[in-house]
């Protein structure tokens, strides 16, 4: 049974940092590219970052490039998203997701390419 469990969300002031984690189980983690998505109230889901199986290649949306860092620890079956210089517009529910197919990484953040999703963790940034 595939499971993805996010943690690390919370409330911070603008300029602050948070580190999200996504613990996975039920599949061979090292075989799958992974992504982070977010959705704010009244807005469409947005793909913010993705990473290859080894972690050697990453993708970021323009809205978070230079501020967020995606990484993974294949020994710990965990995905991370380090978020720095947070702004109120980063307020959203954040989800980790696993690609539908092993060894497939693209298109990077087209949500239809991801089959399994976590329950989400809320990030709230106040000005």
Image (cartoon, helix red, strand yellow):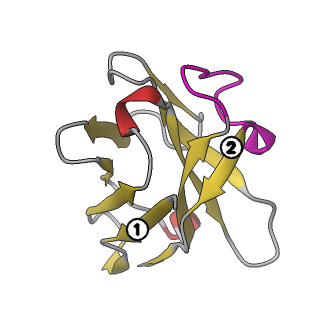
Residue 127 visible, this angle: no
Task: Using the numbered discs, state the Cα–Cα distance from disc 2 to disc 1 in whole angstroms.
Answer: 16 Å
Compared with residue 49, is residue 119 higher up or lower down, i.e. above or below?
below
Q: Position of residue 99 (x, y in %)?
A: 61, 38
Compared with residue 108, is residue 124 higher up or lower down, i.e. above or below?
below
Residue at the spot 33% in from the left edge and 77% down from the top edge? 13
Report the disc number at residue 6: 1
Given residues 45 and 100, the one toward you in this image is 100
Residue at the spot 36% in from the left edge and 75% down from the top edge? 9
- Please tell me in which quadrant of the rendered image residue 127 appears: bottom left
Compared with residue 80, is residue 56 higher up or lower down, i.e. above or below?
above
Residue 38 among magenta residues: no
Q: Main secondary structure of the magenta part?
A: loop
Q: Position of residue 17 (x, y in %)?
A: 26, 62
Name the N-terminal-most of marks 2 and 1: 1
Q: Position of residue 81 (x, y in %)?
A: 35, 50
Number of numbered labels in the structure image: 2
Residue 102 among magenta residues: yes
At label 2, counting other C-alpha atoms closer than 10 Å, the crowd grade (few under 14, some 14-19, many 20 or more) is some
- Start-end of magenta stretch: 101-113
Q: Is residue 46 left or right of residue 34?
A: right
Q: Position of residue 22 (x, y in %)?
A: 36, 59
Residue at the spot 81% in from the left edge and 61% down from the top edge? 44
Report the disc number at residue 114: 2
Report the disc number at residue 109: none
Q: Is residue 114 left or right of residue 127?
A: right
- Mark 2 residue element: strand
- Mark 1 residue element: strand
Residue 50 visible, this angle: yes
Q: Is residue 61 left or right of residue 112?
A: left
Residue at the spot 33% in from the left edge and 61% down from the top edge? 20
């Amino acid at each position: 049974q595939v499971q993805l469990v996010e943690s690390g969300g919370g409330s911070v002031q603008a300029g602050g940092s948070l580190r999200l984690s996504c613990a996975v189980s039920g599949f061979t983690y090292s075989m799958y590219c992974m992504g982070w998505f977010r959705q704010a109230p009244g807005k469409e889901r947005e793909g913010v970052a993705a990473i290859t199986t080894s972690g050697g290649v990453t993708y970021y949306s323009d809205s978070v490039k230079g501020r967020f860092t995606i990484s993974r620890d294949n020994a710990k079956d965990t995905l991370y998203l380090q978020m720095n210089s947070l702004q109120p517009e980063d307020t959203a529910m954040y989800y980790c997701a696993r690609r539908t197919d092993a060894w497939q990484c693209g298109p990077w953040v087209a949500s239809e390419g991801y089959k399994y999703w976590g329950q989400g963790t809320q990030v709230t940034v106040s000005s």
